[in-house]
Amino acid sequence: MISRRLFSSLAAAVTAAAMTMAIAPTSSAADPAAEQYVARHANEALKTLSDRALTAADRQAQFRTLMLRFADVPSISNFVLGPAAAQLRADPELNREWQAVFMDYSVAVYEDQLDQFRGNEVRVTPGASIERIAGRDIIVKSTIVPRGATQPMPVQWRIVKRGEAWKVVDVSLVLDRNEVWLAQRQKQDFAAILGTRGDVRALITAVRLQTADMRARIAARQAGRRA
Amino acid sequence: MRMHWIVAALTLGAAGEAHAQDVTTRDPFEPFNRAMFSFNETVDKYALEPVAKGYRAVTPRLFREGVGNVLHNLRAPVTFANDVLQAEPARAGTTFARFGINTTLGVVGVFDVASTFGLEKHSEDFGQTLGVWGVPTGPYLVLPIMGPSTIRDSSGALVDIALNPINYAEFDGDDAFRATRTALTVLNGRAAAIEAIQSVRDTSIDPYVSIRTTYLMLREASVRNGQTNVQDLPEFEEIPPEAGTGPGGEPLEAQPLPEPPATAPSPAPSE
């Protein structure tokens, strides 16, 4: 039987130890230029969504331009196919088609899903970025508050150097304190549709249908907001 | 005894030949799982989701946060036991201190005072403990009502029930207390996930697959305590400009897509 006094001093010791560990610094290398790059572009994209002066077509076009500038879309669309991406190299026609279909899909996904952050700002956590490859492959940490929520949500941006420019290749969200990288998740989802045969044509058809579905919902939402 | 569950998890896990990234190979029971998934979706559509939405409509956010905090605090013994079993003394200390602070200063766990002291919230379960010790997930499994799981995680959940003293403590109204706790866990959890689940239903080509992927990825991350080692992230191959974009990053084939009408929005070029 532990006496009450021993128990409380034990609890105090454990609390002190735990708090010391909680504030111990973690090792990371900051990159202010990369952090500023993410802050500027992510917020530019969010602003496009809340700009009421834009027509639906203009917003979509602007979003597309920003996405091409901010993200390495060709690299991502190659990555999400996994081993099936080899088919694209053998077939330039298929490659063009896939790039276009995946781009449309990505723009629709982000236009649809980023709506929950409309009117809010991405806040990059200064000095928290981690270098995977020094100066070439960096994970920038940020937070954003979803509309109607009180707690900020952590978002990480993986950016890589392409020539002289930074480009985003993946974004991670934290769900229930665990992180999920979206391009990696997309790759897994597509793998299930591609199946063992790796049928890129079948995937193109499925992705097109899904994009149409999302476009209809975005249009309905925008019409509802205007009304 | 629950030991045979662990043995079953170990055996099936070893037979499952899991690859870290390739989650599709971990679903040998797919036909069964899909049937269970659509059963769960039906239950969700007609019972769980409407009730969760109603609960959200009639309760203020602070109330739901308080309920979540109490439920989380009640699980502290399970998290503590698993922190210890994972040989994580610092995290065990955090859990212990959080439980002490939140139960007292936080008024039986309603307020997460410990977080303001820098003691961050986390939770552990026996499925994660098995994962930490190298037990593979085994096949993916969709459970009735409970939803996505794996052989390892559902075996772990049974061990967790046994690890929590509150499950066999005898006191006045203990059965009612446990029933209320279970109901609130389901309700609070579903209410918190309204947007996340809607987002999967809205954006994924096959929601069954997306939920499976997300579940398996989240569990993999939770075994590593939420973080990915950045060195383990996959490479993104640089695609030369002629394969898709011009030197300025703009597409070579700058085909302006016509703005589709709301009713038939697919660009639908001929196959």
Image (cartoon, helix red, strand yellow):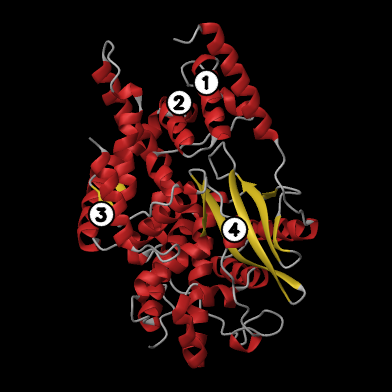
Secondary structure under badge 1? helix
Q: Which residue is mark 4?
A: A49
Amino acid beneath label 4: Leu
The answer to whether residue A118 is visible is yes
| Number of numbered discs on residues | 4
Mark 3 vs mark 4, CA separation in Å: 34 Å
Amino acid beneath label 3: Phe
Q: Which residue is mark 3?
A: B37
Classed neighbour count for the residue bearing mark 1: other residues with Cα under 10 Å, few (<14), some (14–19), many (≥20): many
Secondary structure under badge 4? helix
Chain bearing tag 1 is B
Mark 1 vs mark 2, CA separation in Å: 7 Å
Q: Nearer the viewer, residue B74 or B20?
A: B20
Amino acid beneath label 1: Asn
Amino acid beneath label 2: Asn
User: In this rendering, which labeled residue sits more in front, label 4 or label 2?
Assistant: 2
**Residue pictured at 46% horizontal, 79% vertical:** A83
Whether label 1 touches label 2, CB < 8 Å: yes
Q: Which residue is mark 2?
A: B73
Comes first in the chain, label 3 or label 2 = 3
- A33 vs B251: above or below: above
Classed neighbour count for the residue bearing mark 3: other residues with Cα under 10 Å, few (<14), some (14–19), many (≥20): many
Tag 4 and tag 2 share a subunit: no
Comes first in the chain, label 1 or label 2 = 2
Tag 1 and tag 2 share a subunit: yes
